[in-house]
């Protein structure tokens, strides 16, 4: 018997300023087998984690995403892009966890490398992945409790980080330096509002300051400090549109406490002062409510 849960949490109040806010999240257990089905996905980004249902024997999932054919074993991850077409040639009975993001988050998600190359790949259910999935399932059962929506946002991003590291490790020549740097990049994206000592962060990941900056420059054009500043400015821009906080309060929340410096770097990055940006974006900003996704 199919067991499912789907929660729309885009409008749930958050207690933190984490930028990777989940729009909807849920699961579908004991999905029946499917064959020869075509769909057009709604206007959002969805991540699916598929495992075989109890009693099913292993086989490959055969599907076409964005006109590219995939054959992947279970368990695997699948990314459905906004307004994309996808076709399932064959899927076994399976359990699915899924979570979606607004298409507006694409500019934030793309630099992570999630959309590079394959949109579906095999994963390993490591102890860390199983722990995160277990926590996600637990929070779905008490989604109205204080702080749970924030925890769902964080867990989903941690899952993305785990799957991205696994994706890179499946290349013909896994790059341990890339994995080191991706772990630090993930840390920055989660803790960007905190005071971060780059030297200590490098040492925690087994690198000196010199080797850290040398390795970082191989994978990113911007310095770690500039990357951190951009993350803070992106969150500030979101709050200027969505919140009623004063500009100096937003500056404090994203850890740029000097109001004059905040206004200067914001204007340099966006070409507008924070006040002008808020006025311009609010006048044109509209929120669309999407349909419940077909999560298979």
Image: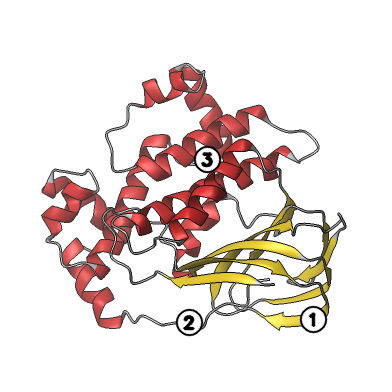
Q: Earlier in the sequence, mark 3 or mark 1?
A: 1
Q: Position of residue 132 (x, y in %)?
A: 53, 46
Query: Do the numbered discs 1 and 2 sit on residues whose CB atoms are within 8 Å?
Result: no
Residue 217 seen: no
The residue shown at (82%, 65%) is 92
The residue shown at (68%, 62%) is 95
SS class, disc 1: strand
Q: Earlier in the sequence, mark 1 or mark 2?
A: 1
On the rendered structure, is 203 left or right of 292?
A: left
Residue 182: quarter of image: top right
Nearer-the-camera pick, 123 or 183: 123
Q: Quadrant of the N terminus?
A: bottom right
On the rendered structure, is 124 left or right of 215?
A: right
Nearer-the-camera pick, 209 or 56: 56
SS class, disc 3: loop
Q: Provide the residue designation for mark 3.
A: 220
Q: Provide the residue designation for mark 2.
A: 290
Q: Provide the residue designation for mark 1.
A: 37
Residue 141 seen: yes
- Give the residue furthest to the front: 1
Q: In front of the other: label 3 or label 1?
A: 1
Find the distance from the CA under tag 3 to the CA under tag 1: 40 Å
- From the viewer's perspective, is residue 131 above or below residue 144? above
């Amino acid at each position: 018997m199919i067991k499912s849960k789907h929660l729309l949490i885009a409008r749930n109040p958050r207690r933190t300023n984490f930028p990777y806010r989940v729009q909807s999240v849920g699961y579908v257990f004991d999905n029946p087998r499917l064959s020869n089905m075509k769909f057009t996905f709604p206007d959002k980004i969805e991540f699916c984690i598929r495992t075989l249902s109890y009693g099913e024997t292993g086989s490959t999932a055969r599907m076409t995403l964005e006109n590219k054919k995939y054959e992947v074993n279970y368990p695997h991850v699948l990314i459905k892009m906004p307004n994309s077409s996808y076709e399932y040639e064959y899927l076994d009975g399976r359990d699915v966890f899924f979570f979606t993001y607004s298409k507006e988050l694409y500019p934030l998600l793309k630099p992570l490398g999630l959309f590079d190359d394959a949109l579906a790949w095999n994963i390993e259910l490591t102890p860390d992945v199983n722990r995160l999935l277990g926590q996600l399932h637990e929070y779905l059962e008490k989604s109205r409790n204080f702080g749970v929506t924030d925890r769902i946002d964080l867990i989903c991003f941690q899952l993305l980080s785990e799957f991205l590291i696994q994706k890179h490790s499946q290349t013909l020549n896994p790059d341990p330096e890339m994995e080191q740097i991706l772990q630090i990049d993930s840390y920055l994206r989660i803790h960007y509002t905190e005071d971060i000592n780059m030297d200590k962060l490098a040492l925690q990941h087994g690198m000196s300051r010199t080797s850290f900056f040398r390795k970082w420059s191989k994978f990113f054009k911007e310095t770690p400090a500039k990357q951190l500043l951009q993350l803070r400015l992106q969150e500030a821009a979101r709050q200027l549109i969505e919140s009623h906080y004063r500009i100096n309060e937003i500056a404090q929340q994203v850890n740029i406490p000097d109001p004059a410096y905040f206004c200067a770097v914001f204007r340099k990055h966006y070409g507008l002062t924070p006040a002008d940006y808020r006025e311009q974006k609010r006048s044109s900003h509209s929120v669309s409510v999407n349909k419940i996704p077909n999560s298979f």
